[in-house]
Image: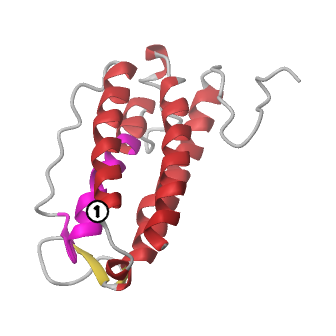
Amino acid sequence: MIVQSLLGEFLHEAENTRKLLNAIPDSALDYRPSEKNWSTGQLASHIAEVYNWYHGTLHQDVFDMAAYKYDKGDISKAANIVAKFEENVKLAQAALEAATDDSMFVNWKMVAGSDDPIFPVMPRVQVVRGFLFNHMYHHRGELVVYLRSTGNKVPGLYGPTADDKF
């Protein structure tokens, strides 16, 4: 029941992520609100990458960021980022569908080249909610601001936006 509930949210929110990524024009990819921020392309690529973390989160008890490798591909075109998202979201869905309710209560930790956890060790279901789902929502919110700041329309994720005519 837990996995099915998470899968329902995953599928709904993947569609929202898809709408948002598809709203990015190539002309906005280099925009960054400050020198400390990622560019729109880097942020969108990171959003696509989060879906690549599902297998390691759901099927490994320890996720070692020092050993993690990811090829983000060419992020100079929005279509490439969307294609990477589509590739990753399929793998993420398969990883979630292969998970079990019992596995959601197994403790999980993230490390970076040692046995010391980066974050507190916690049950996998808490990691899915925080590290995968909420993390994604946070970055999507940033991306909405980036799109607005570059004069682009924002798709409705939870209802109409200011761009929609009522």
| Quadrant of the rendered image containing residue 58 | bottom left
Q: Is residue 152 left or right of residue 102?
A: right
Q: Number of labelled discs?
A: 1
Q: Check the image and name the residue furthest to the top.
A: 27
| Quadrant of the rendered image containing residue 55 | bottom left
Picture residue at 32% right of the left edge, 79% below the top: 103
Q: Which residue is mark 1?
A: 98
Q: Is residue 134 left or right of residue 44?
A: right
Identify the magenta region.
47-65
From the viewer's side, name the closer residue of 148 and 79.
Answer: 79
Q: Is residue 152 left or right of residue 164?
A: left
From the viewer's side, name the closer residue of 67 and 4.
Answer: 4
Going by the numbered disc 1, the residue's amino acid type is Ala
Picture residue at 39% right of the left edge, 77% below the top: 101
| Secondary structure beneath label 1 | helix
Q: Position of residue 91 (x, y in %)?
A: 27, 47
Q: In this picture, is 8 found above or below 150?
A: below
Picture residue at 48% right of the left edge, 53% below the top: 10
Q: Quadrant of the C terminus?
A: top right
Whether 146 is among the magenta residues is no
| Quadrant of the rendered image containing residue 112 | bottom left
Q: Position of residue 36 (x, y in %)?
A: 43, 45
Q: Position of residue 144 (x, y in %)?
A: 60, 36
Q: Check the image and name the residue furthest to the right.
A: 166
From the viewer's side, name the closer residue of 131 and 166.
Answer: 166
Q: Is residue 144 left or right of residue 3?
A: right
Predominant SS along the magenta part: helix
Picture residue at 65% right of the left edge, 28% below the top: 154
Q: Position of residue 74 (x, y in %)?
A: 24, 25
Q: In this picture, is 113 found above or below 76?
A: below
